Image (cartoon, helix red, strand yellow):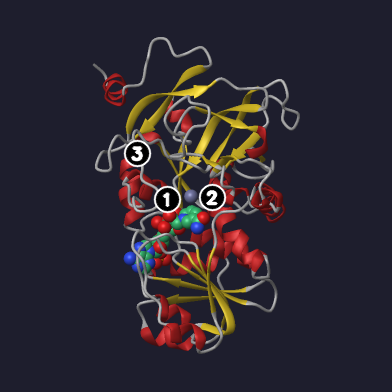
Amino acid sequence: MNEATSMSQVVGIPQATPPKQAYATKAFAAVSPASALAPATIRRRQPGLADVQIEILFCGICHSDLHTVRDEWHHINPTVYPCVPGHEIVGRVAQLGANVTRFKLGDIVGVGCVVDADHTCSNCCEGFEQFCPNATYTYNSPDKHGTAPVTYGGYSDSIVVNQDAVLRIPSNLDLAGAAPLLCAGITTYSPLRRNNVGPGKKVGVVGIGGLGHMGVKLAHAMGAHVVVFTTSPSKQDDALRLGANEVVISKDTDQMTKQANTLDMLLDCVAAPHDLDAYLGLVRRGGNMTLVGAPEKAMPVLAQSLFFGNKSLAGSMIGGFAETQQMLDFCGQHNIASDVEVIPIQKINEAYERMLRSDVKYRFSIDMASLK
Ligand code: NAP
Ligand code: ZN
């Protein structure tokens, strides 16, 4: 029995004759919080009238994939197994529903964290589909089509998505490096824009991983003075190359003190619990600190850290479809893609361990040809 057959039996996915409106496709899945990702066969719906079937070429590895696979967000959104993560998807249009007007066969397209929304609620009407009460997320979200218990993400051969959630990838971008824009790119672009980051603004970025390194590139391209805060001295030179004007090793108290009360905005991209009060002390009067990192545990904040200086602490989650397209177009204009280490999918478990050690510069991107 080969590995794929045994995995398919473990997850109980029918092999021989998938139902008429579904087809079988290859993927990598986890079957429990403690299990490694392993080959699996999953079912996808056949494209409906408004659907686009995408042959996946590259999929970025987001730290949210790891949080979900290991059920670290159990208190908010428990993981349903088998779990197929992946929401930084770039691929080629392989099939179109009869009513699809926005794409043609062969187009290079992207899919991020949301694959469907109701388009009628106030959030959708204002361009915030990610907060739609009826949104379907790319993985671990109830599958409204009934093809599987939950949606399955991009660690897979192909995906079928409503055309409204499909985005255009600028033709000048490297595809492996463009994939992480679909989550890391929009998650950092959106709060930078909301805070009017641009010339004359001093912006801090904390945690130079997948999100953080995109935050540095984008804030630099927007014209801001960028200060990187990192726990990793080995990232110092890279941070300058990515567009930082200054680099602070966050464990060095003297270096931290020099930045006190100077930042107009601080974008916190750290994936593990850390001291928020220490960073609020770096924000200037009236400034803003936005959390995009999602550590599994709550982090305390002293009220004084906020009210002494009328500071605000905010959060931000990905972005709507139109804003994600705007971000992709901005990246096309400025020739910005993610710095990626391209890996075959068979190295996924090793990649997760390396991401936990902050040992990736700065995003893994899976070459999905390795799944064939
Ligand atoms: P990542 O690539 O692992 O980067 C996280 C970075 O945080 C690391 O590179 C490291 O940077 C720093 N870090 C890690 N552990 C730390 C610790 N114990 N203390 C201080 N710093 C530490 O992760 P990512 O994919 O960028 O994701 C970051 C977080 O954002 C995750 O929690 C993810 O789930 C979340 N996320 C949120 C959204 C959203 O919409 N809000 C979207 C995507 C992801 P240095 O080496 O520079 O210190
Ligand atoms: Zn993500």
Mark 1 surroundings within 10 Å by alpha-carbon count, few (fewer than 14), some (14 through 19), many (20 or more): some
Residue of label 3:
347
At mark 1, the secondary structure is: helix
Pick out the residue farthest to the top: 17
Residue 298 location (% of width, % of height): 36, 66
* Labels 3 and 2: the sequence-earlier one: 2
Q: Position of residue 128 (x, y in %)?
A: 64, 52
SS for dot 2:
loop
Left or right for 10, reference 322: left
Label 3, label 2: how far apart the Cα atoms are? 21 Å
Residue behind label 2 places its C-beta within 8 angstroms of ligand 2: yes
Who is closer to the viewer here, 85 or 178? 85
Q: Are marks 2 and 1 in contact (CB under 8 Å)?
A: yes
Circle 2 sits on which residue? 183
Q: Is mark 1 within 8 Å of ligand 1?
A: yes
Amino acid type of the residue that numbered disc 1 sits on in the rendered structure: Ser
Q: Residues within 10 Å of mark 3 (few under 14, many from 20)?
A: few
In this view of the protein, which residue sits in the foreground, 226 or 291?
291
**Which quadrant is home to the N terminus?**
top left
Residue at x 35%, y 26% (from the top left corner): 40
Do we see residue 234 in this rendering? Answer: no
Residue 12 percent across, percent down from the top left = 31, 22
The mark closer to the camera, 1 or 3, is 1
Which residue is at a point 44% across and 46% down the rendered structure image?
A: 61
Q: Which mark lies nearer to you, 3 or 2?
A: 2
Q: Mark 2 is on which residue type?
A: Cys
**Identity of the amino acid at label 3?**
Lys
Considering only order in the chain, which callout, 1 or 2, is on the residue closer to the N terminus? 1
Quadrant location, the C terminus: top left
Can I make out residue 265 in this image? yes
Q: Is residue 358 above or below residue 198?
A: above
Residue at label 1?
Answer: 64
